[in-house]
Image: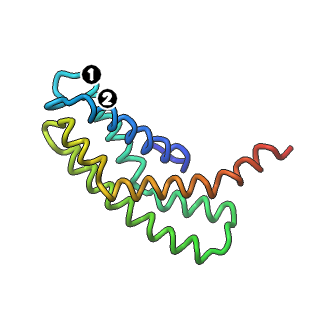
Amino acid sequence: MINSLADRTNAIEECYEFMLAYAAQGLPGDQGSASGGQLREFLRRAVEALSGLADAFRAAVKQDSLEPAESYEAFLAVLDRDSTDSLAAIQLVEAQPSLSSQLIDNLNASIHLRALLTDLFLIDEILKPRTAKIEVSP
């Protein structure tokens, strides 16, 4: 089970990066290729990471007492929507009997997945100074 926000973010970003490479291979399907099996594992991990993503960020906001709370709550609604939409798209693709490079390329191009990645980059930049401060503290 993926618990921390950083682990969730890494799983989603790694999946996206792998999908970019898979899409470039021009494969008609995932059967019989090593990368096809890897793709399904990356998708599985992304699904796990997306499930409860907004709640994980909410816990980080609460733990770090981030203010103003209203701004974070408003963004959490966006993150929840984007992660739910991305989860639905990934699960639809994951359910297909064959995963072609073209199908994965279309998933990569999904506005839902791109919005989610932008959300994650934003979160990372917001939390980065806080984690750096914690690592430096004696």
The residue to which callout 2 is attached is: 38
Q: Residue at x 44, y 52 (%)?
A: 117
Q: Residue at x 13, y 38 (%)?
A: 97
Q: Residue at x 49, y 61 (%)?
A: 55
Check if mark 2's residue and mark 1's residue have beta carbons within 8 Å.
yes
Q: Examine the rendered structure and indicate whether residue 96 appears above or below residue 123.
A: above
Q: Provide residue 83's location: percent of width, then percent of height.
A: 39, 59
Secondary structure, mark 2, is helix
Secondary structure, mark 1, is helix
Q: Residue at x 50, y 68 (%)?
A: 76
Q: CA distance from mark 2 to mark 1?
A: 6 Å
Q: Which one is nearer the viewer's eye here, 50 or 3?
A: 50
The residue to which callout 1 is attached is: 34
Identify which amino acid the numbered label 2 is placed on: Gln
Task: Locate residue 133 relative to residue 25 in the image: left or right.
Answer: right
Q: Provide residue 120's location: percent of width, then percent of height.
A: 50, 54
Q: Provide residue 21's location: percent of width, then percent of height.
A: 33, 32
Q: Examine the rendered structure and indicate whether residue 112 appears above or below residue 77.
A: above
Most extreme residue toward the right is 138
